[in-house]
C-alpha cells in the first residue's frame, strides 16, 4: 500500500481537505463551508473515510503556516495541516 499525504488548508475562509496524488490532475477533495471552528480530528477522519482513505498507523496531524502570496509575509496567513494516509483497508478504488 502506497503512503500518501492528506492536507487541510484555509486562508481564513472555508477549510479544504484533499489527498495529494502526484501525477493526477484531480485530487479527492472535500470543502467545509465554514471558516470556524477548525474541523476536528474526528471530522477529518470521517471525510477521509468518505474519500476512501484512512490515517496511516502512528501518523499525527502536523501544522505549518505560509503566506497567501509566496514570499510576502505581510499577506494573510494560510494554515496547512498534513498527515500521512493510505487507502482504506478493503477499499477497491
Image (tube, rainbow, N blue to C red):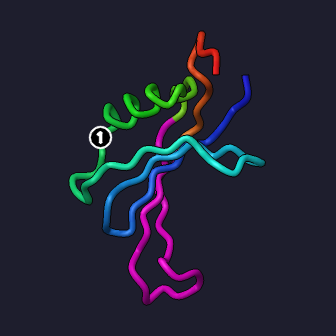
Q: In the rendered view, would you say 8 is above or below 90?
A: below
Specify whether 50 is left or right of 26: left
| Residue that badge 1 annotates | 40
Rendering coords of residue 81 (x, y %): 47, 52
> Is 32 part of what is drawn in magenta?
no
Badge 1, how many Cα within 10 Å: few under 14, some, many 20+?
Answer: few
Rendering coords of residue 92 (x, y %): 64, 15
- Residue found at the very far top of the displayed protein: 90
What's drawn in magenta, residue-wise? 60-82
Main secondary structure found in the magenta portion = strand
> Is 70 part of what is drawn in magenta?
yes
- Tell which of 74 and 21 is nearer to you: 21
* Residue at 47% in and 67% down: 65
Quadrant location of the N terminus in the rendered image? top right
Quadrant location of the C terminus in the rendered image? top right
SS label for mark 1: loop
Specify whether 49 is left or right of 21: left
Q: In the rendered view, would you say 57 is above or below 20?
A: above
Rendering coords of residue 45 (x, y %): 40, 30
Amino acid at each position: 500500500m502506497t503512503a500518501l499525504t492528506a492536507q487541510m488548508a484555509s486562508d481564513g475562509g472555508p477549510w479544504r481537505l484533499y489527498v495529494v496524488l502526484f501525477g493526477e490532475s484531480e485530487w479527492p477533495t472535500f470543502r467545509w463551508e465554514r471558516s470556524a471552528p477548525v474541523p476536528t480530528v474526528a471530522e477529518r477522519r470521517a471525510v477521509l473515510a468518505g474519500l476512501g482513505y484512512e490515517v496511516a498507523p502512528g501518523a499525527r496531524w502536523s501544522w505549518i503556516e505560509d503566506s497567501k502570496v509566496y514570499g510576502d509575509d505581510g499577506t494573510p496567513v494560510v494554515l496547512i495541516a498534513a498527515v500521512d494516509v493510505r487507502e482504506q483497508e478493503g477499499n477497491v478504488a
